[in-house]
Amino acid sequence: MAEKGIVKTDKFEMEYFKFGSGDKCLVMVPGLSIQSVTGNSSAVEGACKIYANDFTVYVFDRRMSIPEDYSIYDMADDTAAAIKKLGLKDVNLFGASQGGMISLVIAIRYPELVKKLVLASTSSHIQNGQSAVIDKWIRLAEEKNRRELYQEYGREIYPSDIYEKFKDFFTEAAATVTDEELEKFVILAKAIRNFDVSKELKKLDCPVFVMGVFEDSVLDSDATMEIAENLDYRDDFALYLYKGYGHAAFDTAPDYKKRVYEFLMKE
């Protein structure tokens, strides 16, 4: 069973959970979510059991109390501080969506922490027109329209067949969302608008695996390709694009975690 904890520093507190018993370290930074990922620790552990024998896996949430102007760069600094506080070294870093943005900044600013980097359905910056879906989520959260927010979130990140299967679950989950969670979601979502490390990608000095989806309706597959175009000259760079699995292919593609595992285990 996943072990939950709280990292405490002079500046913040951050929830995390860990599982697995391997000698290698895997840190996972999840994407933007309406409610904390720590509430689904058992589901994450079950979905990621492929890592459990070779890795000890740490999954970090965002800090528990966030300021109004909290940026992706702040999130990265805080997550790096949490990694250091726990004494983690030679970290294999996996970041999905907004978590990929955070992971990019960590790998650029704190290269001594990161052994390998996996970027899932993410972007190095938000171009014109790429924030339309996120802007819609922000509006619904500001209106406190919990049900429609959860429905739109599910509709955009999952393929239509998976969305239809879980549509009732999204309605049930929406009823549990607090005003505080909506306010936090708005701050975190707005941070994506001004994010840009596109000119710093060549500072990455660890092996990088970029995974995207052709039909990514949240961030657009062009965002994945832009990262690839900046790194594909390197022998330690790998790219894989899915078709038909939606933005959250990291949850829906059956071979996704196996591909990540093989990249991380490769010497």
Image (tube, rainbow, N blue to C red):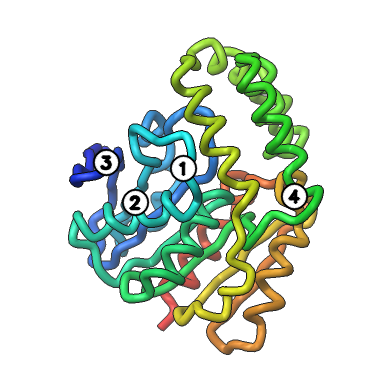
Q: Residue at x 53, y 45 (%)?
A: 31
Query: Amino acid type of disc 1?
Result: Tyr
Disc 1 packing (10 Å; few <14; some 14–19; many ≥20):
some
Kindly indicate whether the residue at mark 3 contacts the one at mark 4 (C-beta within 8 angstroms): no
* Residue 251, percent from left and from top: 57, 45
Which residue is nearer to you in this view: 263 or 79? Answer: 79
Q: Secondary structure at mark 1?
A: loop
Q: Earlier in the sequence, mark 3 or mark 2?
A: 3
Farthest residue toward the front? 69
Kindly indicate whether the residue at mark 2 contacts the one at mark 3 (C-beta within 8 angstroms): yes
In the rendered image of this protein, does residue 32 appear above or below residue 200? above
Query: Amino acid type of disc 4?
Result: Asp
Which residue is nearer to you in this view: 192 or 211? Answer: 192
Q: Mark 2 sits on what residue?
A: 78
Relative horizontal placement of residue 50, taking residue 218 as reference (left or right): left
Q: Earlier in the sequence, mark 1 or mark 4?
A: 1
Relative horizontal placement of residue 13, taking residue 96 as reference (left or right): left
Q: Mark 4 sits on what residue?
A: 216
Q: Residue at x 69, y 33 (%)?
A: 162
Q: Quadrant of the C terminus?
A: bottom left
* Residue 250, percent from left and from top: 58, 50
Residue 70, label in figure: 1
Q: Residue at x 50, y 24 (%)?
A: 183
* Spatial separation of the CA atoms under disc 3 and disc 2: 8 Å
> Which one is closest to the eye, mark 1 or mark 2?
1
The image quadrant that residue 167 belongs to is top right
